[in-house]
Amino acid sequence: MRLFVAVIPPVAALQGLADAVAPVRGLPGADRLRWTTAEGWHLTLAFLGQVPAERLPELETGLAAVAEVHPVHRLRIAGSGRFGDRVLWAGVEGQTWALRRLAEAVAEATVEVTGDTDDFAFHPHVTLARSGSHRGHRRAVQRVAAAELDALAAALAEYRGPEWEAAELHLMKSDPDGGSVHYESLRDWELADWG
């Protein structure tokens, strides 16, 4: 199974972002992007890659332990940017230090299963769109120029969504389905409520 660990914003936060993104999809260059859907929007804490089913109990035990000691925290989807000429994203504000600590703890708790000990620069974001073709995609998509991605990001730069509470940790499964990807939450754990 192809797995990752994520925080999923609530419906109100996703709807606010969807409303802000809708007019951006009509801007120059937007038609050459593969846009993600609100149903799949999440904040990836750690990508685990291919994990055998027999390792799930070990993963679940580690993630449950992480959730027990990391508190609920307040976030909001805000701002935007790009990763090179490949990805358009929406950013995150608020108690991002708590989100960063959560991501670090998840990476530590899953290293035995993934074998990945590389340090990564955690950048909390929601992926909105990708440029270029996708494996399994029948038609080649022309890549969007970095300047066009800059213009799309600038259109969302002032966006500030509603504040929300990150209260759960999700173990997610990623299934490619033709040209798109379907995400399923396999298990979730409530974060510690110290309030």
Image (cartoon, rainbow, N blue to C red):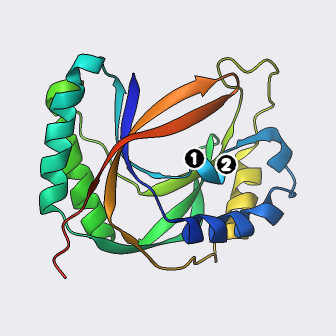
Q: Residue furthest bottom?
A: 195
Q: Which residue is mark 1?
A: 40
> Which structural element holds mark 1?
helix
Q: Specify the quadrant that holds the C terminus.
A: bottom left
Residue 11 in percent (x, y) is at: 56, 65
Nearer the observer, 168 or 163: 168
Tell me, yes or no, whether the two marked residues, 2 and 1, touch with CB atoms within 8 Å: yes
Q: Residue at point 81% right, 31% down?
A: 142
Within-10-Å neighbours for mark 2: few <14, some 14–19, many 20+: some
Which numbered disc covers residue 37? Answer: 2
> Residue 97 appears in which quarter of the rendering?
bottom left
Q: Residue at point 69% right, 57% down?
A: 150
Which numbered disc covers residue 174? Answer: none
* Amino acid found under the numbered disc labelled 1: Gly
In the picture provided, is 140 more to the left or to the right than 167?
right
Determine the CA span between mark 2 and mark 1.
Answer: 6 Å
Q: Residue at point 82% right, 21% down?
A: 139
Q: Specify the quadrant that holds the N terminus.
A: top left
Residue 14 in percent (x, y) is at: 59, 64
In the picture provided, is 32 more to the left or to the right than 70?
right
Q: Is residue 92 above or below residue 127?
A: below
> Residue 79 appears in which quarter of the rendering?
bottom right
Q: Is residue 97 above or below residue 87?
A: below
Within-10-Å neighbours for mark 1: few <14, some 14–19, many 20+: some
Q: Residue at point 62% right, 40% down?
A: 86
In the picture provided, is 25 more to the left or to the right than 133?
right
Nearer the observer, 126 or 18: 18
Residue 147 in percent (x, y) is at: 74, 52
Q: How many marks?
A: 2
